[in-house]
Amino acid sequence: MNETAAQPIDLLIEARWVVPVEPHGVVLENHAVAVQGDAIVGLLPTEEARAAYVPKQTVTLPAHALIPGLVNAHTHNPMTLLRGLADDLPLMTWLEEHIWPVEGKVMGPEFIRDGVELAIAEMLRGGTTCANENYFFPDTIAATYKHHGFRAVVGLPVIEFPSPWAKTRDEYFERALAVHDELRGSELLTTAFVPHAPYTVSDDSFERIRVLADQLDIPVHLHLHETQKEVDDAKRESGLRPFQRLQKLGLVNDRLIAVHMTAVTDAEIAACAEANVSVVHCPESNLKLASGFCPAEKFRQAGVNLAIGTDGCASNNDLDMFGEMRTAAQLAKAVAQKADAFDATFALRAATLNGAKAMGLGECIGSIEVGKQADLAAVRLDALESQPLYDIASQLVYATGRHQVSDVWIAGQRRLADREPVGMDIPDLLGRVRAWRERIAAI
């Protein structure tokens, strides 16, 4: 006779399917995830879970796949307020003649707060639970994410020209270190240095970042080889490709999060693998800006940790990680000219666990495993658009829209309930967004 008492827990989520991501390619039918506090304490068949636990709350999802919360590995989330402002333009025209001038006139704590809040609502409704943030005013960004219980890596910006955030190189570093110190011990927020790109950051700044990143044990997240023009210009001016320059400066290592990487050589791909660099693929932004094609399958085959990001809403124009997974998988097949390249199970892994690993959070989130944080997304699969169901991973990547996400938990707290963001005043938010639209359109 089994005399083991049932264990009290906070939450039991019973799902038709659980896709843990690790082990790779596994789909568990009629399983439940047990949550105590902020962590997963059990993953087992539903009937066994009912006998093993006494939950304060049970959520039953009879037509859903429960997946790890999606990890958006490259964002500029305040830029949700610039969505659709300057479309169909080349990258540098878009940046220099439109985005940077507007940012210079509106950037400040209120703009940052409202843009991030809009992004949080959008991300929750798309099953995203963690963002790798790259923008100015990281103090306001952090406060906004903290207020809404959203997980993020807060970027500490470094760039060589003045901005409303900092006027000099020393001020960028001073303010970066102050934000990092303020976030020490935060439950949901960590930091990374975000030097914008090799063409906007000096060797002196990169050397300082390398030393500080080592001391603070944080990643370095930057745009790299986004276009062929970037590479050609650097080669003409310095004799070095940007990647070679970063190698020379000691930044090509396991802290580096290299975003875009469209114009790369086989030798550079091999160097990324050898140094344990993480690469973030932003296929829709690259397509929209005609930046080039990241050879994603070559990176995957080389063993590089490959993650997925949306980029900012000014260049994508959404934060839809389901759409990004699909585009990443399909584009990789076309670039590699192999139909079996970048398969659905890998696409889901790139959008979850690989993103977490890139951000230094692989032991914490990105898969549904006992001991990890309970960052989870429930995706409803009983709509006619999702039928019939042969392969859950394929359905999630190739036939599922973000509108099918019903519920989201971050660190065990429900943040989306039946498509409604919890604790957010959406009418008030939309009113503030409309006010920003009027102000920005008048510039």
Image: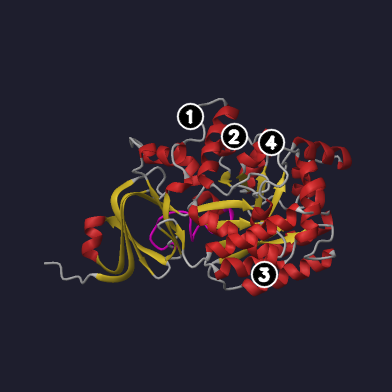
Foreground disc of the pair 1, 2: 1
Left/right of residue 164 with respect to residue 407 in the rendered view: right
Q: Against 38, is 278 above or below?
A: above
At label 4, the amino acid type is Ala
Q: Identify the mark at residue 267; answer none if there is no mark.
A: 4
Q: Earlier in the sequence, mark 3 or mark 2?
A: 3
Mark before the other along the chain sequence, 2 or 4: 4
Is residue 219 something one can see in this rendering?
no
Alpha carbon distance from label 1 to label 4: 24 Å
- Label pair 1/3, CB-CB below 8 angstroms: no
- The question of residue 359 being in magenta is answered with yes
x and y percentages locating residue 176 in the rendered image: 73, 67
Q: Is residue 370 left or right of residue 47?
A: right
Query: At numbered mark 4, what does the secondary structure look like: helix, strand or loop?
Result: helix
Of the two numbered discs 1 and 4 on the same chain, state the one appearing first in sequence.
Answer: 4
Q: Main secondary structure of the magenta part?
A: loop
Q: In the rendering, at what x and y percent does residue 402 appear?
A: 48, 47
User: Measured along the vertical axis of the image, is residue 147 above or below residue 86?
Assistant: below
**Which of these two is toward me, 218 or 66?**
66
Q: As shown in the figure, which amino acid type bears the numbered disc 1?
A: Asp
- Highlighted range, magenta: 358-373
Mark pair 3, 2: CA separation: 35 Å
Mark 4 or 3: in front is 3
Q: Earlier in the sequence, mark 1 or mark 3?
A: 3
Determine which residue is flagged by label 1. 340
Q: Kindly report the distance in space between the C-alpha atoms of the residues bearing marks 1 and 3.
A: 42 Å
Circle count:
4
Q: Which residue is mark 2?
A: 298
Give the Cα separation between the discs numbered 4 and 3: 35 Å
